[in-house]
Amino acid sequence: MYTAGFEPDGPYTPPGDDERERLADGVGRLLDGDAAQAERLLAPLGLGVTRLTDTDSGRRYDEIAALRPNGEAARWGRLYLTADSPVRWNVQVPHPVSDRDTEALGVRLLEDTPSGALVVAGAHRRAGRGDAADVAHREDSAFHSIVVELQKRGVPGLQLHGFAESSERPYEAIVSGGAAQSTSGEATALADRLEADGLRVCRGWQARCPLEGTANVQGRSAERRHAGFLHVELAPDARDDGPDADETSDALADLLRTWADD
């Protein structure tokens, strides 16, 4: 995966205001089905649109990615959109590599569940200067601009994070609405499903959980726009090849199918 080379001391410069606006316009055009105009808008940014086909499932996706692998735009991230139907949900991976295996889980969910999109950050969260690449807490990122375009269209989002298990975090999963402290039926159903599969779950709307994501800027934006948003923190055992990973992936996929059927 293209995230394999991400390093905490790697370079990163966020896009400027005009670049983010142009990116948002291009993403919007692609979401509206106008790939040609999306390409024209994105090309000056060093980004292109490519149609991909999953050889196993036959599903088609449109990818927005940098035209040059070592260019500045390569560190802004990638977007994958279903090309077979309207987009009904999106999975967000703001901290690839840093939150180990969240990127692999995001890909798995995109491949296993129809009608979705995947937004992946383009750098390690500690890359660049200060917290510039911590896109879950920065609005001046390509990642945030893309997510907001999806929110404007009412597309609900699932944001994946990872944490190191400790005595202070005796859970396999922490589920919350981010900035929204109220609960939704989907959040409750997800927590119930994870617990039924044997995972220990902290519910952000019922308890004082660590890592609830209340300062998450995508969650705050979703609340302002009345778009669905779930913030899910996973312990190592619940990610990728951990002993609880299959149960976690299946539960998250069921959530996405619920959104797809709405």
Image (tube, rainbow, N blue to C red):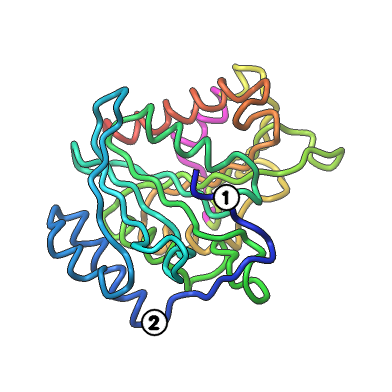
Q: Quadrant of the C terminus?
A: top left
> What residue is shown at x 29% (from left), y 46% (from top)?
81
Cα distance, mark 1 to mark 2?
24 Å
Q: In which image quadrant can residue 58 be found?
A: top left
Image x and y of residue 251, in percent: 50, 25
Image x and y of residue 216, in percent: 56, 60
Q: Which mark is residue 13?
A: none
In reply to whether residue 181 is colored magenta, the answer given is: yes
The magenta stretch spans which residues?
Answer: 180-193
Vertical order, 91 against 259 (above or below)? below
> What residue is shown at x 65% (from left), y 71% (from top)?
131
Mark 2 Cα-neighbour bin, 10 Å: few <14, some 14–19, many ≥20: few
> What residue is shown at x 57% (from left), y 30% (from top)?
191
Q: Amino acid at mark 1?
A: Pro
Q: Which residue is mark 1?
A: 96
**178 or 93, which lies in front?**
93
Q: Which mark is residue 17?
A: 2
